[in-house]
Image: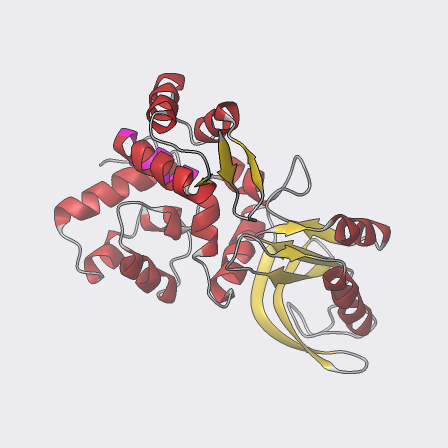
Amino acid sequence: MKVVKFSGDIVEFEPEKLKKSLLKSGASHEAVERIVNSIQSQIYDGIPTKQIYKMAFGLLKKESNSHAAQYNLRSAIQMLGPAGFFFEKFIARLFTAEGYKAITNLTLEGKCVTHEIDVAIRKDDEIAIIECKFHASRNVISDVKIPMYILSRFNDLKDRKQNIFTNTDKISSCWIVTNNRFSSDAVAFGNCSQMNMLSWDYPKKDNLRTKIDSSRLYPVTCLTTLTLAEKDKLLVLDVILASELIHNTQILERLGLSPNRIKNVLKEVAELCKYLNHES
């Protein structure tokens, strides 16, 4: 059975690969078997993988909202657009959870020109700048021109004292973070230049996906019990993480949700973020 990937490539359908992705959502082996068997009975030669994903998401949602939310992670991150401003806030929160101080949306003076910086982070005496490359389409890859460009910006900024966390800060390193992937040349250049790089699947053991899963810091756009319009309103209100709703029921009331819907949203958040002691 042939399937058409997001990139347009035609490949063989791999049931085991689908099972693996479903198991990552936390669904049981029994539930995954039911879902895969149902999908296999419905797919046809040449079906887009996007359609298979929609089928899997719908079936998984019937099993568990929180598992569907976790399965929906990559699409949820793409919903932090279209410009990527909310993606920058999301990345700042990820680093904050790892013990950094973080500031978004800065303007800094370099030796030669002025630079708009997405995120600045600090831990101990180390200060770094982060360039966030957000892509609304899954097919876009950050190529070697991106780390080359970011390195030139870092070099223009690093020798000057900056007013970031204090008025005498010096930037010691830089990061590139993308919600998609890096090309092999981009990775090679970044490594050679001692740049920090983070993408959906890079590095292999501490990438964007694994960081989110291990910290349970899922974007609010993951939630299946909210509409797109409600998620957009939460982002504008600076509610970026699902976990930020757990002790903030008032903001759900502001959205006009009924008590029953609020209960369902909080139940999904509690399960997704492993707040096992939450009273639903």
The image quadrant where one finds the C terminus is top left
Q: In the picture, residue 263 is in which quadrant?
A: top left
- Does 223 appear in magenta? no
Residue placed furthest toward the top: 30
Q: Is residue 160 left or right of residue 74?
A: right
Tell me where residue 147 appears, x and y as whole percent.
75, 60
The foreground one among 228 and 92 is 228
Q: Is residue 89 left or right of residue 109?
A: left
Q: In the picture, residue 160 is in which quadrant?
A: bottom right
The reply to whether residue 236 is visible in this rendering is: yes
* Vertical side of 18 occupied by 180: above or below: below
Label count reads 0
Tell me where residue 229 appears, x and y as whole percent.
28, 61
The reply to whether residue 275 is visible in this rendering is: no
The foreground one among 31 and 105 is 31
Name the residue at 83% across, 71% down. Answer: 159
Name the residue at 67% across, 36% down. Answer: 204
Residue placed furthest toward the front: 45
Q: Is residue 260 left or right of residue 174?
A: left
The foreground one among 47 and 177 is 47
Tell me where residue 207 appears, x and y as whole percent.
62, 42
Q: In the picture, residue 88 is in which quadrant?
A: bottom right
Tell me where residue 12 appears, x and y as whole percent.
55, 31
Name the residue at 33% across, 32% down. Answer: 60
Residue placed furthest toward the right: 192
* Vertical side of 271 occupied by 165: above or below: below
Name the residue at 64% across, 70% down. Answer: 117
Specify start and end residues of the magenta stretch as a single range: 63-71
